[in-house]
Amino acid sequence: MHDLSEILTAMAAQKEKVEDRRELLFDMSDLIVKSVSQAFSCKQEEVAILLVTGDGRHLRFIAPRPFADLGTIPLTKRDSIAVRVLAGRSGEVINNVPMVKHVTFFESVKLKDVPTPIQKMVTTPILAGKQPIGVVEVSRKGPSPREAGPDFTAADLDKVKAIFDAIAVPLAQARPDDF
């Protein structure tokens, strides 16, 4: 993950030289998603990254990329797992997502042929220092919990947190002010 941090830091340093800073942020998210999906043996569409908008009032997806233009999640929406994790500044492991009240709109969006429900998820805030800048969700999707794969553990939560602790600052630096 040290290499990923170095690459993202170098990319963020180029922000003033790129024509479209949103595309820079999306390119960075593509690298992150590829690395995280490999680390957790999951599909790339099972990794979601949401950043706090420039006005500090919403969360907006940067991954999966097709979600970026679908809308935002208000930070007042307390039935959102991502909002709850951001507000509490503490990660959580949920191995029974269908049993937890949460926003399901984004799950219904087709990234492949048929939308597949999230069964299991590890979620943690992304903190640049002490400043919360977003949330990451690594999930396991499937028709049933058994078919989705193994349960997430506290060690998985620690692993996701460590990855994003190392890359939070370049993510924060690359986020356009009008994002």
Image (tube, helix red, strand yellow):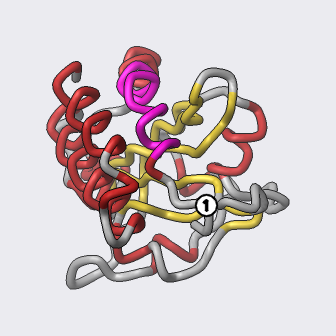
When the figure is inspected, residue 78 is found, relative to residue 135, above or below; the finding is below
**Circle 1 sits in a helix, a strand or a loop, which is it?**
loop
Front residue of 67 and 156: 67
Residue at the image point whose x is 68% and y is 31% from the top: 131
Q: Is residue 53 magenta?
A: no
| Spot occupied by residue 6 in the image (x, y as percentages of width and height) | 23, 27
Front residue of 137 and 130: 130
| Spot occupied by residue 97 in the image (x, y as percentages of width and height) | 53, 50
Question: Would you say 74 lies left or right of 104 here?
Answer: right
Quarter assignment of residue 21? bottom left
| Spot occupied by residue 158 in the image (x, y as percentages of width and height) | 44, 17
| Spot occupied by residue 85 in the image (x, y as percentages of width and height) | 67, 39
Q: Look at the image and give the residue range highlighted in magenta.
A: 160-173
Which residue extends farthest front? 17
Quadrant including the N terminus: top left
When the figure is inspected, residue 53 is found, relative to residue 41, above or below; the finding is below
> Is residue 56 something that shows in the picture?
yes
Quarter assignment of residue 84? top right
Which residue extends farthest right? 76
Front residue of 164 and 173: 173
Residue under numbered circle 1? 177
